[in-house]
Image (tube, rainbow, N blue to C red):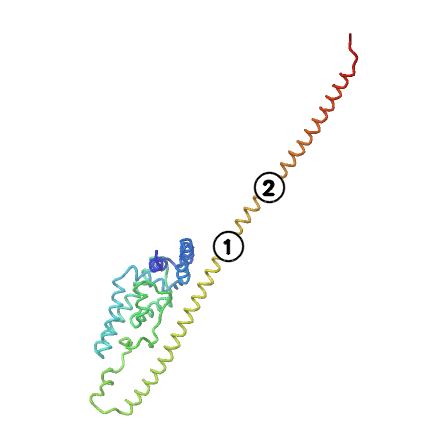
């Protein structure tokens, strides 16, 4: 299997089975002479309960996921056209889709033997909202590969406008943008200043996010290397223990051979003594026979 197939396999498992299966797959990749694949597998993180529940729903209900992703595309298109009416319509639709999808996620988790807490259910809804606003979260949802719950804070990709739910909808954005043909007011200029300040904050936050991602990637690489080193040392220790056991067995066998050889040596020495006694007796008999007078 390649890393894509392996990732699909792992993120389809129950959380309790994830670590053991990942360890087996790492060992299998190493046994097949593919250390790079082993490292890629080792850094795959076990999903949280909320992420796991959403992943299982995504795998079982592709139509439901498609509805969420289609809504994201529609909201982005409406924002680019500055269509306030359409955005309000989609905001209401988003509320309904997120509610229905959250219920579906809870039901799927229950069929897998897991009852989500109220807090977990709230995180499911937040994650689905994030998928509507953030392309990266949406892609993870589509693949069923979320690792943690997600929350959209409003500082998203450029060009993405997050519309509040229908109950929270504010003034029509087109009224502000066009000013209905009037000259800019102090309020307009003040708003522009606030927007510029917010954009500067966004740039700073985005840079910090990128730095954090880089550090996380570096830590992931370091962890993968450490995991690989641990696995190598475990294998080496197992091999040395096996060699030691073999040496101990050979040593015990050699000692038994020495004991047997000692016994055989003593037996042979006794046999030699007996043979020498018989030779001496035979020589005496010969001498006596030679020295005896003739009977005639």
Quadrant (top left/top right/bottom left/bottom right) for the N terminus:
bottom left
Residue position marked by numbered label 1 in the rendering: 236
Judging from the image, what secondary structure is the residue with disc 1 in? helix
Q: Is 219 in front, or is 281? A: 281
Quadrant (top left/top right/bottom left/bottom right) for the C terminus:
top right
- Determine contact: label 2, label 1, CB under 8 Å: no
Q: Is 194 in front, or is 4? A: 4
* Disc ID at residue 254: 2
The extreme left residue here reads 181
Circle 2 packing at 10 Å, graded few (<14), some (14-19), many (20+), is few
Please provide percent x and percent y for residue 36: 40, 60
Q: Is 98 in front, or is 259? A: 259
Please provide percent x and percent y for residue 264: 64, 33
Residue shown at 20% from the left, 89% from the top: 181
Residue shown at 42% from the left, 71% from the top: 215
Please provide percent x and percent y for residue 167: 28, 77
Circle 1 packing at 10 Å, graded few (<14), some (14-19), many (20+), is few
Residue 183 lies, with reference to residue 17, above or below; the image says below
Q: Is residue 3 left or right of residue 175?
A: right
Q: Quadrant of residue 281?
A: top right
Instruction: Report, in whole angstroms, how far the alpha carbon at label 2 lies from the one at label 1.
Output: 26 Å
């Amino acid at each position: 299997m390649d890393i894509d197939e392996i990732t699909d396999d792992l993120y389809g498992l129950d959380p309790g089975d994830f670590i053991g299966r990942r360890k087996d797959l790492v060992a299998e990749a190493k046994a097949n002479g593919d250390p790079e694949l082993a490292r890629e597998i080792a850094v795959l993180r076990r999903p949280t309960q909320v992420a796991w529940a959403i992943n299982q729903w995504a795998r079982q209900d592709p139509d439901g996921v498609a509805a969420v992703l289609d809504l994201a595309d529609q909201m982005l298109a409406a924002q680019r056209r500055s269509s306030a009416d359409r955005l309000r319509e989609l905001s209401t639709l988003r509320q309904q889709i997120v509610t229905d999808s959250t219920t579906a996620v809870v039901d799927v988790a229950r069929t897998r033997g897991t009852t989500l807490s109220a807090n977990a259910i709230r995180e499911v809804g937040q994650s689905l909202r994030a998928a509507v606003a953030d392309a990266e979260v949406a892609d993870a949802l589509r693949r069923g590969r979320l690792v943690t719950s997600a929350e959209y804070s409003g500082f998203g990709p450029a060009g993405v406008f997050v519309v509040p739910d229908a109950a929270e909808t504010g003034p029509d954005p087109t009224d502000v943008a066009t000013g209905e043909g009037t000259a800019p007011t102090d309020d307009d200029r003040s708003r522009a200043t606030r927007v510029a300040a917010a954009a500067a904050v966004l740039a700073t936050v985005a840079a910090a996010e990128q730095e954090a991602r880089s550090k996380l990637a570096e830590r992931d690489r370091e962890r993968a290397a450490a995991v690989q080193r641990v696995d190598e040392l475990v294998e080496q220790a197992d091999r040395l223990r096996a060699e030691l056991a073999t040496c101990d067995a050979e040593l015990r066998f050699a000692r038994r051979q020495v004991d047997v050889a000692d016994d055989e040596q003593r037996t042979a020495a006794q046999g030699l003594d007996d043979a020498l006694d018989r030779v001496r007796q035979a020589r005496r008999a010969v001498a006596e026979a030679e020295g005896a007078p003739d009977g005639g």
